[in-house]
Image (spheres, rainbow, N blue to C red):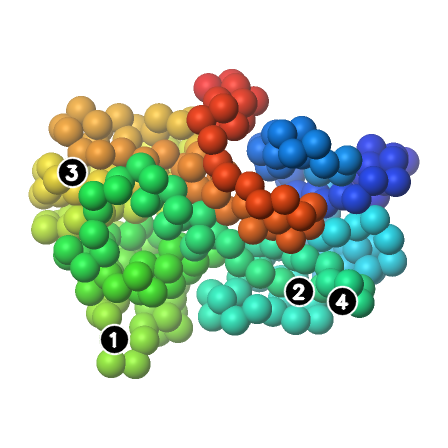
Amino acid sequence: MSAYDTLLAEAAGRPFAAIVGWPVQHSRSPALHGFWLKQHHVDGHYGRLPVKPERAALEELVAFLKKTPNARGCNLTLPHKVEILPLLDRIDPVARRIGAVNTIVKQPDGTLEGRNTDGFGFLEALKYNAPHWMPDAGPVAVLGAGGAARAIVASLIDVGVPELRLVNRTRETAIDLAVALTPPGGQRIVVGSWDERSELLQGATLLVNTTSLGMMDQPALDIDLAKLPHTAAVYDIVYVPLETYLLAAARSRGNRCIDGLGMLLHQGRPGFEAWFGPRVDVSAAQRHAVAADLGA
């Protein structure tokens, strides 16, 4: 039985969406969407769909979504967020600017629209967990320059952060991101070398880690927080584990800390609402349920 047949059998004729990636078994999106489906008494299904990182496999995914009447769309995780772009019928302006898609919504006419909700999820979790942080208060340091970093940098620009300090292990990738997202006559994006990452924390109001460093089975993020103000917030978008080495170190010196689970939960809201209808919020009960699914 193919992965598509398995998903159809699980949905059993109900409206459905899924998380698409390679690999995808680690994703906790089914737990967060399953919570909302149950909470709002929606007779729908959200599953997992492993899709190989090949053009033909993505074309098969697009054809499946279009031809299956009860398919509502999907979420995309690594490594498909960029490669899917040319295969979709429409890309919304936010996703076009970021250059990546994490949500596909099937329209009433059967066409597929690509959206990006990562920036929305990042900001919503930031506002909830660090309500006193003000975008215009000073510089923000961002580690990493991948797809998530692009969405986060774009969202920080949009809320008025005056200066972004961007550091990536491959500096050329950070330069490309800065060139693509720097607004004409707008905020500065300062690209530093990876060796400068600790120095660039001087005077920052927020530190964001978008790299995989600190994730389970990955090396810890090696950074000296000595120059980071104690009033700064520290945000690690990793959510396995919830308490990374970075957050533990920041918490021990009194910084307000934000883990990656909040971003995961909030980025799912727009997709769920588009696929299944009800407006949803992130609750403590949902966070507890998803954290339990993580084994946290």
**Quadrant housing the N terminus:** top right
Residue at image position (49%, 24%) is 285
Which labelled disc corresponds to residue 113? 2
Name the residue carrying label 3: 225
Residue at image position (33%, 44%) is 126
Whichever of labels 3 and 2 marks the residue nearer the N terminus, that label is: 2
Name the residue carrying label 1: 186
Q: Is residue 208 above or below residue 114?
A: above
Across and down, in percent, residue 135 comes to: 23, 56
Q: Secondary structure at mark 4?
A: loop
Across and down, in percent, residue 228 comes to: 13, 42
Give the residue type at disc 1. Answer: Gly
Whichever of labels 1 and 3 marks the residue nearer the N terminus, that label is: 1
Check if mark 4's residue and mark 2's residue have beta carbons within 8 Å.
yes
Q: Secondary structure at mark 1?
A: loop
Within-10-Å neighbours for mark 1: few <14, some 14–19, many 20+: few
Check if mark 1's residue and mark 2's residue have beta carbons within 8 Å.
no
From the viewer's perspective, tell me whether residue 184 is left or right of residue 205.
right
| CA separation in Å, label 3 and label 4 | 48 Å
Give the residue type at disc 2. Answer: Glu
Across and down, in percent, residue 276 comes to: 69, 46
